[in-house]
Amino acid sequence: MSQALQSLLDLLDLEQIEENIFRGQSRSVVVPRVFGGQVAAQALVAAGRTVPEDRHAHSLHAYFLRPGDPGAPIVYSVDRIRDGRSFTTRRVVAVQHGQPIFHLSASFQVPEDGLDHQAPMPPTTDPALLPPSEERLRSYEHLPAEVVERLLEAREAVDLRYADDPPFGRFGEPREPHSQVWFRTNGKLGDDPLLHVVLATYVSDMTLLDSVLLAHGRGGWAVGDVVGASLDHAMWFHRPFRADEWLLYDQESPSAYGGRGLGQARIYTQDGRLAISVIQEGVVRVPWDFGKPRER
């Protein structure tokens, strides 16, 4: 296991304060606010800590309410909404400085047999043939060195490989609003299913709105032509998977309007099983529309 991955696992390992209250630390290596994937992953950890081990997460729905302060801890309060025979529901509120910054509802299910079909895995490139993040990022001479280092630092714990240039790698010309990224953790994980779901949740917030930018030839914060933030995020976990084995993140954007952009995606295992579906809406503003920071 890489040191960066161990540091990430330590970050996601919450301190239990009371039966339904947990505390997590914060850090941000990309922007001066807490990375949304971190908050979502920590909230899912908090919910999972109150659920019997025989029930696995099958969905989450979340809203990002306020920017998180990376210099302060986050308190997660878990509400035990329901414990049924097959399903368990939890609601989690993340609080900083006395105000809620994030809200999550998660559902867990006892594994059972049922109908089985899926959308086929789309054509893609073998991840072994794609350049690692460092190689690709350092090839973009137009990116300032400090931006490259911040992007690389954000990816130290995860091997993230783009099938094509990301928005900040080739911008100025609109492209198809479709992006493919392969990812896996930089090291092996244990066998706890919740751990793999939590790591996938963390990574899912990294690139999902890229397809919105591609449709307009925008490069994003790395080149300063777009300012954005996650608004809401939903995931459905269909089949077992491991976050330390290659997963294909196939992403597209069906719409952008009114200062918001929608991304939707499917995550497949390397052998073609549909593991996760994801949908996210985010604020996407060009600088002349943004002006002074506003509350979402």
Image (spheres, rainbow, N blue to C red):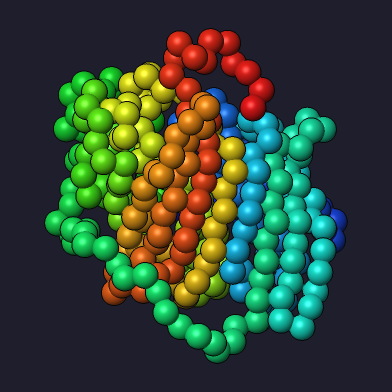
Farthest residue, direction right? 18
- Compared with residue 79, is residue 172 higher up or lower down, i.e. above or below? above
Viewer-closest of 59 and 119: 119
- Compared with residue 90, is residue 30 higher up or lower down, i.e. above or below? above
Q: From the viewer's perspective, tell me whether residue 284 is left or right of residue 36.
A: left
Q: From the viewer's perspective, tell me whether residue 281 is left or right of residue 130.
A: right
Quarter of the image where the N terminus is located: bottom left
Residue ID at (31%, 35%) = 214
Residue 287 x, y percent position in the rendering: 44, 14
Quadrant assignment, res 45: bottom right
Residue 16 x, y percent position in the rendering: 76, 56
Residue 285 showing in the rendered view: yes
Q: From the viewer's perspective, tell me whether residue 192 is left or right of residue 219.
A: right
Quarter of the image where the C terminus is located: top right
Residue ID at (34%, 55%) = 250
Residue 11 showing in the rendered view: no
Quadrant assignment, res 145: top left
Q: How many marks?
A: 0
Quadrant assignment, res 272: bottom left
Viewer-closest of 120 and 229: 120
Viewer-closest of 115 and 55: 115
Residue 219 x, y percent position in the rendering: 32, 27
Residue ID at (30%, 55%) = 182
Residue 266 x, y percent position in the rendering: 40, 59
- Compared with residue 41, is residue 210 higher up or lower down, i.e. above or below? above
Residue ID at (64%, 49%) = 62
